Image (cartoon, rainbow, N blue to C red):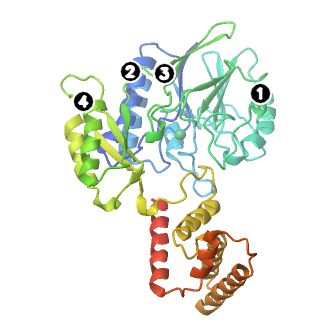
Amino acid sequence: MKFLHLADIHLGCRRYNVEERTADFFRAWSDVLARHALPNAVDFVLICGDFFNSRKVDPQAMNHAIIGLQMLKEAGIPVVAIEGNHDQHESDAVNRFSWMRSLSQWGYLALLEPDTRDGFNLTPWNEAERSGSYIDIAGARIFGTHWFGTSTNAAVPLLTDALRRAHGDGLFNILMLHTDVEGQLNRPNIPALSISRMKELRTLVDYVALGHTHKRFEIEDWAFNPGSLEACTIDEFKEERGLYLVEVDDAHRVTARHSRDYVQRPFQRLNFDVSGAPDAEAVHAGVMDVIRLEAHTYDAEHDDSPAPIIEINLRGHLGFKNSLLDISRLREEARAQTGALHIMISNRSVPVEYAVAAGLDSDATRGVRERRIIEDLITRDIRFRARAHDMAALVLDAKRLALEDESPEKILELIEQQLELADEHMTNAPSTTTGETATATAGATIPIDDTELVASASALQAIERNAAT
Ligand SMILES: [Mn+2]
């Protein structure tokens, strides 16, 4: 028995508004079939979720899907699929339709879904209705599940019971699962399937065909995750991804070979530190130097692989305003220089005017970050430096009241009260105060004029805008 194990094909994925990029997902899909499914005459192809990038499939993505599925149909190779989180059907009873279900109805693939009408059951494939939870092909019994979301771990006992009832004795039992697995690129908020939970299935399943995580991994030669065919975001470009060509001998021994031998869009990430550059022209020249030295140049006539997408990261402290950088000119020149399909410029530099909260732990919560930023800004004003910590708390209290729609008079009252308290505290401080504190105490009597308040408010807004982009 030989089969192809694919997942996360994401047809219809659009990025960077580059039309060519959408075609990449199709190219990968059709190239994999042409290079691996057809020449190896596999018995079936598994698609473990996220065949489409969205449940609202656009017409071009459907064309791309059908071209590949037709190729397999003509070669007599069945396709077995499950839904992923990206292409799952709507959960309300009215919307029982989905494009994955339609493809199953039309005979292009067998969509396997558990039967949840009366508990959790795995029902045999019904050819007349073109639906079911498991199907037997070439000595394999293939079970399909759906996206369990946050309840993956809770679903395992139900799944185990259902598998026990439907297990194919003497057959090679395959379980298709679309889920994160503990320890592998886990996302926050969605609990991954724990390894110990998964192992409860061990005696019932010979091969766990995974999808969802866009990175290849394997667990004890038993559970396999091929990774997505293409990188769906720039951050995924470094991960290993591809497909498995799996061979199973008569004793049910598994040989799974991972391959990334098909057309994939090359990516390159370059860095430039803007710290110390006196003006925008110097940044421009510096970036162009890095591109000339390090970027892959693409020559349409001589290169076999597609033109790369190049990301340029601007890092460090920018000594002038962001808006002085001419990003589109930089992008155009970099493109002309390299022949890249697309140049992404990620400006992660920090303008000096906002160079606050430096050295803060990257895991710090929003609350901690906000307080530090405000404290740093206050520290710049000699009048409040010595009590920046308390002043930051006061600013945050005032903000909270403003968000709660408290009247300006009440907020002013709070500020005045706190400032008086602070002054008293400073005046009554023991005589062993340092020079710095003494200066601050003297300064504290200077009245706060309106222009100061306006300036710091707009600086804060600028920081929030910056943080949100
Ligand atoms: Mn996916």
Which amino acid does the dot numbered 2 rest on? Ala
Residue occupied by mark 3: 77
Q: Residue at x 27, y 31 (%)?
A: 293
Which amino acid does the dot numbered 1 rest on? Lys
Question: Is the residue under label 2 in contact with that under label 3 (CB below 8 Å)?
Answer: no
Of callouts 4 and 2, the N-terminal one: 2
Question: Callout 2 environment at 10 Å: few (<14), some (14 to 19), or many (20+)?
Answer: some
Question: Is the residue under label 3 in contact with that under label 4 (CB below 8 Å)?
Answer: no
Which marked residue is nearer to the observer: mark 1 or mark 2? 1
Is the CB of mark 3 within 8 Å of ligand 1? Answer: no
Q: Residue furthest bottom?
A: 409
Quadrant of the snapshot with the N terminus: top right
Helix, strand or loop under label 4: loop
Residue 74 seen by the camera: no
Q: Residue at x 50, y 81 (%)?
A: 453
> Is residue 206 left or right of 369 when viewed as pictured?
right
Residue occupied by mark 1: 199
Of callouts 3 and 1, the N-terminal one: 3
In the picture, residue 192 is in which quadrant? top right
- Toward the viewer: 455 or 29? 455
Which amino acid does the dot numbered 3 rest on? Ile
Which marked residue is nearer to the observer: mark 4 or mark 2? 4
Q: CA distance from mark 4 to mark 2?
A: 26 Å
Question: Is the residue under label 2 in contact with that under label 4 (CB below 8 Å)?
Answer: no
Q: Residue furthest top?
A: 250
Of callouts 1 and 4, the N-terminal one: 1
Residue occupied by mark 2: 34
Residue occupied by mark 4: 298
Helix, strand or loop under label 1: helix
